[in-house]
Image (cartoon, coloured by chain):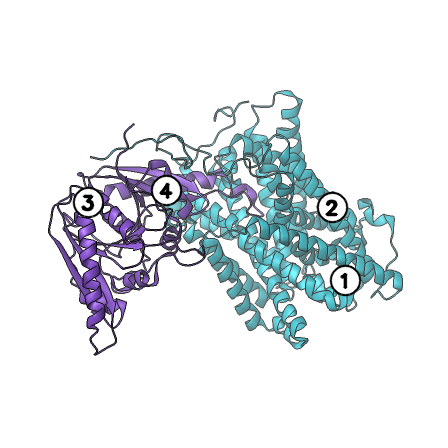
Amino acid sequence: MTRVANYVVAYEATERGNDTVELGVALARLTHSELRLCLVLPHHSPTVPGRVGAVSSPDYQALLEEQSLEWLEQGRALVPDDVVATTHLLYADSTTEGLLQAARTFGSDRIVVGASRRGLMNRFTIGSVANALLHASPVPVALAPRGYKAPAQLTRITCAIGTRPGWKTLLDSLVAFSEDLTVDLRFVTLVEVDAGRRHPVEETESQTHLAGVLEYFQSRSTAHGTITTEVASGHSVESAVEALDWQPSEVAFVGSSRLAQPTTIFLGITAHRMLHALPVPLIVVPTGTDARKPH
Amino acid sequence: MTSQTPYSGGAPDTSTRTGGLSEKGLSAGSIGLLGATVIGISCIAPAYTLTASLGPTVAAVGTQLPAIFLVGFIPMLLVALGYRELNNAMPDAGTSFTWATRAFGPWLGWMGGWGLIVATVVVLSNLAGVAVDFFYLMLAQLFGNPDLADLTNNVVINVVTCLVFMVAAAYVSYRGMETTKAVQYVLVAFQLIVLVWFSVAALLQVSDGTAFDSLAFSADWFNPFVIPSFSAFAAGVSLSIFIFWGWDVTLTMNEETKNPKTTPGRAATLTVGVIFALYLLVAVATLMFSGIGAGEFGLGNEEIQGNVFAALAGPVMGPFAILMSLAVLSSSAASLQSTFVGPARTMLSMGHYKAFPKRFASISPRYKSPAYATVMAGIVAWGFYAIMRVLSTDVLTDTILTLGMMICFYYGVTAFACVWYFRDALHGPRAILLKFLAPLIGGVILLVIFATTLFDSMNPDYGSGSNIGGVGLVFILAMVLFIGGIVLMLIQRSVNPAFFQGKTLTQGSSKEHGHME
């Protein structure tokens, strides 16, 4: 059986779930992939010490299942005809675990989740499921901003790249993602500067690094489209991100290494702060040593 | 183009819309004998149950406390056997509401569901009330300031604290959070240790002669036949049903257990063995320490009857009394949260079958829990508690007595539902015993107990002695709850008659529903 490129879409019947489907559709259109709409239900736990135990029975489970199938149907109705989507009802101890299992069994390329619905001004705040996924996912995780609507076509990918080791893994992932696609690519580095002072040295270093990035990427990429580079500076990561222009039909890529301590947040501090200012979807690529090679 | 691809194999179970009911949600085969027993004990929550029921039971039967605990188990056992048969035959419909509707049709079915909801809502308010008492008692013990314990007697503070507890428990339940297995083991072990400690400390004081009102042990305490009147007996049995409430859970665990054939039965036996031993030990120790007089720490003292350990832990356990506060507080808090699941799911089920307004059937898309029903259960339970707190001189005693009656009612309805539903399936001695005789006798006992206590509760002296116009508060309460249920049922009937016309759930017997063995 040949593997079909596919995305696990973490669906729930909320605004956030709808955002997730929209992002899934946008990415599927660009990369000609299928969507696996997954709704994760908690394992029925018999360990609930309810006095009326007979009620914590399959009856409730059946109603929940019926409702969930209805929800999945609603989710699938959001997917336009040009994208193939299948629906799956999963059981797991936690939503995160269910999504990871689904990604494993479907051989998915990426997992799409919604950012928390409580984000202000359409900006990202990471919800608990997304956060847990970012800590554990071996495949890239795409985060949908609140109220996201899929454009007819994604036209540009911005890749935020740092000088830390692992940037090559990020580029490899981007090469795989943009294989044979007609899409513009923009490489940016973010420079934090003190207000009112110029830091020509850092900007020059960034330019040099970007040249190296460009060379590495162009020698491998099969994408068609213009490639640009940009150095964005601001007194904070957030303001550097805001200094860049962002198009509605754009997605951002960022790499993130899994750090040694399991309790340390998976997203680097820079990437995390970037998220807060970002108005477009973000795809976080694991660049640690155990990151899976892209297909 | 969209497609539905059935997916098979691999770790995540995926369902398609074709295969009706699935058991995929159950974590099959994960529970062994010890685990099942812990769940059983945890459902009963002995520390909470004893503190709430010892007083009212002594008020009913005096020193025959151990005897009534033993006898009270009989109807519970008989009905639970019927429960198990129904649960095996209709696992897709696991509530008294659906069972009774299937057997007797919509009207009795509705009232059966109503009885279950009312009973669980009443126990929620009692649980919260006990938790409030122990919360302030624990603060007093922590800071060495006895005045803090008296805060619970301030009606406003008490009702507001109860609201806070209720909101917290409802929220945890709404979020779909569950007590983990490890926490459950610890809570159960802690309760058992503290209760045994309490009993041993009480007995030591008896032998040292320092007990409050030392009563010499008598074998007669175990003899149910010397209970002075049938009314007293009925009241005692009604309360005993409350103290074993939750035990039937062990019997209905099937697929979840490692060995469905033997584990549930063994766990049920082990659970009831542990609970018997514990209840008898605590009952005897408390009787020997306190006596049944109306003195400060006497079990006959109406002031302390609704929450016995709150009063006795200090004199019995001395500086370690705070452990009792912790045990009862943790057991009632855990029970409060998990008890929300019961009425919420029954309301959801009733909403689904159009027996309740449709919004009760709403499930939170985010947390996958019965959102509206959980909130309603919380509001009603708190409202009930607040009203009782104002009306009754001893809110806890009166709610427990009402509760006993409500449990008798819905257990009774369920027992008869079993007898009637299996009327065509009585082949062989085993079926006759489990599907007919046991639930029939259990149901009749419950019916008699229910009728007797209902009649007796008209007496203004019944329970805490609270009354309205010379009629006992417990009777008025029961009537309000039943008539309220009938009124709501008629309203629902006129708004949306589908359920009452048998369009959503069909009446029949096991033969007609194809549940023949």
B139 left or right of B25? Answer: right
The C terminus of chain B, quarter of image: top right
Disc 2 is placed on an element classified as helix
Q: Which chain is purple?
A: A
Q: Chain of mark 4?
A: A
Q: CA distance from mark 1 to mark 3?
A: 88 Å
Q: Are marks 2 and 3 on the same chain?
A: no
Q: CA distance from mark 1 to mark 2?
A: 23 Å
Q: Callout 4: 10 Å neighbours few (<14), some, many (20+)?
A: some
* Foreground of the two, B194 or B117: B194
Q: Nearer the viewer, mark 4 or mark 3?
A: 3
Q: Earlier in the sequence, mark 4 or mark 3?
A: 4
- The disc labelled 4 sits on which kind of residue? Gln
Q: Colour of chain B?
A: cyan
Q: Which residue is mark 4?
A: A67
Q: Quadrant of residue A38?
A: top left
* Foreground of the two, B390 or B382: B382
* Foreground of the two, B358 or B466: B358
Q: Residue at x 65, y 47 (%)?
A: B41
Disc 3 is placed on an element classified as loop
Q: Residue at x 56, y 23 (%)?
A: B424
Q: Nearer the viewer, mark 1 or mark 3?
A: 3
Q: Which residue is mark 3?
A: A220
- Residue A91 location, x and y as percent? 42, 40
Instruction: Tell me the tag on residue B300.
Output: 1
- The disc labelled 1 sits on which kind of residue? Gly
Q: Earlier in the sequence, mark 1 or mark 2?
A: 2
Q: Chain of mark 3?
A: A
- Residue A70 location, x and y as percent? 32, 40
Q: Which residue is mark 2?
A: B276
